[in-house]
Image: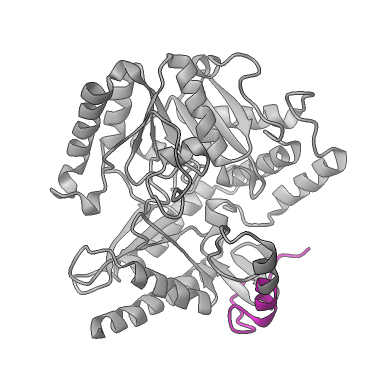
Amino acid sequence: MTMPEQRRILATAIPGPLSLERQVQRKAELANGLGTTMPVFIERAGGGILVDVDGNHIIDLASGIAVTSVGASHPAVTQRIAEQAARFTHTCFLVTEYDGFVDVAAALNRLTPGEHAKKTALFSTGAEAVENAIKIARTATGRTAVVVLGHAYHGRTSLTMAMTSKNAPYKQGFGPFAPDVHRVPSPYPYRWPSGPEKAAEEAFAALEEIVTTQLGATNVAAIVVEPIQGEGGFIVPPPGYLAKVQQFAHEHGIVFVADEIQTGLARTGAMFACDHEGVVPDLITTAKALAGGMPLAAVTGRAEIMDAVAAGGLGGTYAGNPVACAAALGALEVIESEDLVGRAREIEARVRPRLEAACGPDSVVGEVRGRGAMLALEFVRPGTTEPAPEVAKAVVERCHQEGVLTLQCGTYGNVIRLLPPLVIGFDLLDEAVDVLLDAIAAVGALETQA
């Protein structure tokens, strides 16, 4: 199938009549707990464009939540998928082996931060990777406690829900959760009570106090951090914070785990977000962009820690599926050969100044933040830091009506995040930002009048 025409086309209202018809069937057939951001049905996609069943060409600023960084149908990925599917679709690597699993592990051992000896285990989803990182850390240390940050998001399984901060919609009604998970304050510079310049020092002091006096450092197996917090609102930690946490963990024999499921593999303008701070985690989790849309996740880490688990303790029926591994080898090839790390930096240089121009004391945009092609705007009541989730929602809805897909996030629901495919054309990107800024101006004007 050929690449969709790379331009925005509004063939109908969005959602169009054919998508609306399908919504009726969806409601009849699917559980209500499955939400949706933009109620359109997609029939093909590629580059920076999603084509719905009504013929609308929608500019993609979501990448399936940072998954299709190389685009939704890059030939390097789709051809490898087709070739592997024609050979075999599954054996279960724990039963009989295949090269793709080993090749993906070797690539991750090479690409992840640090020059130490590493090993990798493959899984299917990001939450599964995080959960296995905890299993590995607990086995390696003989300890049980897990420390996570406020505003964190780590998944939807029982353990990773316990590690996730936000209650609704991720946790409401699903408890009780896995025990021995403990939360420390996140250094959220924009909202730090004593000011952003004190966030790193004071947040680290709180972590140190909680771990040493309340938990006992000798009881803590792992400290798990997102180098940029994703669902929490694209919160970038202040300089020096991650390094302090890493050093503290090292001094106390605690496994330092970086959850790079959303930030990893070129998204932030470095291969991994940890690279911006020169931080080398003991274990690192990847998923999302790893396999270009196929379900694949990984834990990569220090060989001696990874080898703490006995044979048979890790795995899963679909873990490291051969078709997903083939897709990953294609996606990783594109990320390196097309310098998508550099491309993410170019996206930031092009987009960020335009977004920052929308900030101001009388603006509904309180802050622009992020790194690379992982950028966000936090919406507030003008002149305050009071969260304005309804303003963010109104901006998102206007963008969707105009054929630009954006996503809401944040603990307070007041953040719009931008995650364009790293291969998006700059003309499309510029047009999408035009639409976004127009929506902000229109909604902001209504807010001011109110």
- Is residue 101 visible to us here? yes
Queried whether the magenta region covers residue 13, the answer comes back as: yes
Queried whether the magenta region covers residue 302, the answer comes back as: no
Please report the residue visible at 37 percent of the width from the left and 40 percent of the height from the top: 276
Please report the residue visible at 48 percent of the width from the left and 31 percent of the height from the top: 284
Image color mode = one colour
Q: Position of residue 46 (x, y in %)?
A: 66, 62
Q: Residue furthest left?
A: 194
Instruction: Residue 278: name its quadrant.
Output: top left
Q: Is residue 66 left or right of residue 164?
A: right
Q: Position of residue 16 (x, y in %)?
A: 64, 80
Residue 63 vertical placement versus 89 (above, below): below
Instruction: Residue 378: name its quadrant.
Output: bottom left
Please report the residue visible at 66 percent of the width from the left and 18 percent of the height from the top: 312
Q: Position of residue 51 (x, y in %)?
A: 66, 70
Q: Nearer the viewer, residue 300 or 124?
A: 124
Q: Position of residue 183 (x, y in %)?
A: 32, 36
Residue 13 vertical placement versus 81 (above, below): below
Give, as a single range, the part of the protein colored magenta: 1-23
Q: Is residue 34 left or right of residue 360?
A: right
Residue 213 vertical placement versus 265 (above, below): above
Instruction: Residue 450: name its quadrant.
Output: bottom left
Give the main secondary structure of the magenta stretch.
loop
Q: Is residue 313 left or right of residue 343?
A: right
